[in-house]
Image (tube, rainbow, N blue to C red):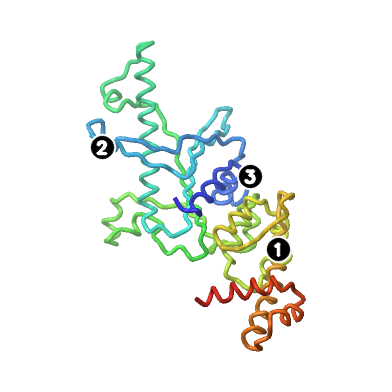
Amino acid sequence: MGKIDIATKQYMSHRDIIADAFNFYIYDGRQVIKPEELQKIDTAEIALPYGNDADMAVQKLRDNLMLWSMAKDDEAVYVVLGIENQDKIHYAIAVKNMLYDALQYAKQVEEAKRSYRDRSKKKQIKLNSEEFLSGFKKEDKLMPVITLVVYFGDKDWDGAKSIHEMLSVDNVELLSYVPDYKINLIEPAKISDENFDKFKTDLGAVMQFIKHQSDKDGSWIKGNSRFNHVEKEAVELINIITGAKFAGDDKEEVVDMCRAWENSMKDAKIEGKIETLYEECEMSIPDIAKKVSKPEEYVREVIKRMKAACL
C-alpha cells in the first residue's frame, strides 16, 4: 500500500468525514447523516459466491465501512456505507465495487443463516423447505449497501462509471436483460467552486485544492475563508497528494493556507530571481544574497535545488 493510499484511508476513516462525503453526494450538503449515527464495522467481506459447495471463500478488504443507524417511524433503520479511495483512475472500479456490495449482501444472508442455526440449539426454529434452502426467511430483509468512490486526483475521470459502459456490445435490446451497476463518484474536477461550500468539514478544502493544484495565479484561494483555518491532518493530506509544502505552527491545530500560499508565491518569485541572477547575470552568491535580502545559506540551498533539477 502506497503513501497516498495509507493517508487517504486514514483521513477517510473519521466518522465526521464519511458523514460529510455522503451528505454532499446524496443530500446536496444537507446534514442528514450525523457522525454519531455511524459505527465502524469490519471491512473484510468474506463469502462463498457460488453456494455452499464452493471450495474456496472470497475475501476482499474495503477501505472504510460504516453502519448508519437512523430512526424512522420510531424504529431503527440500518444502512451500510462504504468508502473507496482512489488517487488514480481505476478503469474496472464498477466491477470492483459491484463485487464488494455483492459480498456484503452475501455476508448478511450468511449471518441470518447462522443466527437461525445458533438459535435452533436453544429454541426450535422452524424453516420451511424453501427457507431451509437459503437459510433466509421470507420476511427477512437486507440492509442497503451504498459504496461511494472518493477520487483524489485532479484529472477528469475518464473511466467507465457503470458495468454497461464496460461491455463490448451496445445493443439496447440485449442490454435491457443485463443488470447494470453504476458507481457513485466524488470527482474534484467536476465540482464547481461554489459547491465546495456544501462540504462541512475540511474534506471540501482538500477536494478544492486538488482541483486547482496546477493553477498558478492563486485567485481561487485568495480571500477564500475555507482556507483560513484548515486542520493539520487535512493539510498533511494535501501535501502528500499534491506535493505542496504547507507548514504550520507546531503549537497550532490549524493552518492558515491563504497566508501560507501567499508566502510560497513570494518565495517562488525570490527563487526565480536568484536563478536569473546566478545563471544569466553570473553574480556571486554573496552579491545575490544582498540583492534579494536573504542569507547566503538560503541562496546556496536554492541554487543547489536548481542544479539538482537540471540533472
Q: Position of residue 200 (x, y in %)?
A: 65, 50
Q: In the figure, is residue 144 to the left or right of 11? A: left
Label whose residue precedes the other's in the sequence (1 or 3): 3
Q: Tell me what residue is drawn at x 52 percent, y 36 percent.
A: 40
Q: Secondary structure at mark 3?
A: loop
Identify the mark at residue 31; answer none if there is no mark. 3
Q: Position of residue 241 (x, y in %)?
A: 54, 59
Q: So how many labels did they put on this image? A: 3
Foreground mark, 2 or 3, reads 2
Q: Secondary structure at mark 1?
A: helix
Q: Amino acid at mark 3?
A: Gln
- Give the residue pinned by disc 1: 260
Q: Amino acid at mark 2?
A: Tyr
The residue nearer to you, when weighing 173 against 1, is: 1
Q: Tell me what residue is drawn at x 57 percent, y 48 percent.
A: 11
Q: CA distance from mark 2 to mark 3?
A: 40 Å
- Give the residue pinned by disc 2: 50
* Dot 2 alpha-carbon crowd within 10 angstroms: few under 14, some 14 to 19, many 20 or more: few
